[in-house]
Image (spheres, helix red, strand yellow):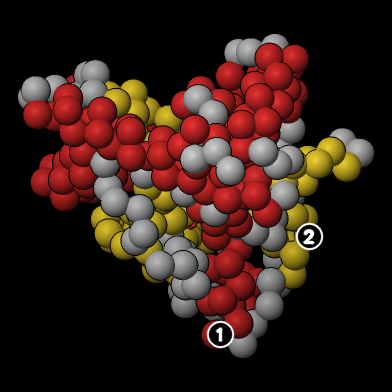
Amino acid sequence: MARLHARIGTFRQLEILLAVHSAGSITEAANRLFLTQPTVSMQLKKLAEAVGTPLYHQLGRKLVFTEAGLEVVKSARDTIDTIERLEMKLYDLQGLKTGTLKLAVVTTAKYFIPHLLGEFLKLYPDIDIDFKVGNRQQIIDRMASGEDDFYVFSHPPKDQALELYEFLPNPLVAIVQPEHPLAGKKKIPLQTFLNQPFLMRESGSGTRHAIEKHFEQQGVKPNTRMIIESNEAIKHSVMSGLGVSVLSEHTLTFGGSSGLAKLDVQELPIMTHWYLANLSAKPLSVIARTFLDYIAATGKDSLIHELNRSSQA
Ligand code: PGA
């Protein structure tokens, strides 16, 4: 049998393999890599020949990775991570901060994370940012690939070994149309609020997870009229009088609140917190460590300052 290192393909082939694995299809991976489909297929064929066993099977339109294929994917990820870390370390030794910071954040965090990144990039203009957004479940699913440096959640999964850094409160507040009869009332009983048609985020959403947990603890149920997959669409539906909802206050402070009123409801807001999470098993890159240090040293305070300023405006 040929020695293992002689059987593993080129670095580029490993990158292509990872792209195909995370995209789930040759076409999508080719798009992401700006390559043609035949180039991607050819490189994977060469890699499979080098490894000496098929890496995946095509079942209809679906790619199913073989056990050997999954092992190669895992090692490819470790290899690329190691090389990237080495690259960043070498730049760091030369006093240069350059490389890519990979963030995957839940939809609600997309309102404020860019404000943190603006300041960070002024300090480190040579750092590139890879910024992915999904609901809580989609971000949890991304963790399996171990690609990202940090995840931003207010409800990190409990069954993953994660390092958590809490950096910001996240109040979930009740909202209505300003013309609604409840607008402006004080200490509205929770049940009165919940008698209104409720607009709920989709299943898999962290906001929904927090709302359901809180209402369950209070022994109440919302009167759900619509399931809506986006904070912005919920805001617009509330503005147009379709119902009431509960959303992170950051969707209003950073995303605009005109046409909406916050309600003073008993047992609300739901108080949660934002966490920066990284996989315990994946060592932080130089860039990731720099970002974490930046948040702890100044980013967190300047964000809180900006939040206070926007909520008073
Ligand atoms: P979501 O997550 O965007 O999936 O609702 C928000 C959160 O985790 O609080």
Residue 252 falls left or right of residue 63: left
Q: Quadrant of residue 272?
A: bottom left
Label disc, if present, on residue 225 of the rendered structure: 2
Residue at which label 1 appears: 218
Q: Secondary structure at mark 1?
A: helix
Report the label total.
2
The N terminus is located in which quarter? top right
> Amino acid type of disc 1?
Gln
For the residues marked 1 and 2, what is the alpha-carbon distance in whole angstroms?
20 Å
Q: Is mark 2 within 8 Å of ligand 1?
A: no
Residue sitting nearer the eye, 91 or 102? 91
Where residue 230 sits in the image (x, y, percent)? 63, 44
Where residue 45 sits in the image (x, y, percent)? 71, 26
Look at 72% across and 46% down and name the residue there.
65
Look at 43% across and 60% down and name the residue there.
154
Residue sitting nearer the eye, 260 or 285? 285
Residue sitting nearer the eye, 146 or 192? 146
Residue sitting at the far right: 60
Residue 295 falls left or right of residue 194: left
Q: Is residue 148 visible?
A: no
Where residue 310 sits in the image (x, y, percent)? 30, 39
Q: Quadrant of residue 55?
A: top right
Q: Is residue 105 above or below residue 265?
A: above
Where residue 160 sits in the image (x, y, percent)? 46, 67
Look at 23% across and 23% down and name the residue there.
98
Assess disc 2: are there few (<14), some (14-19) or many (≥20) residues with their C-alpha within 10 Å of its C-alpha: some
* Mark earlier in primary sequence (1, 2): 1
Q: Is residue 128 above or below residue 209?
A: above
Residue sitting nearer the eye, 160 or 181? 160
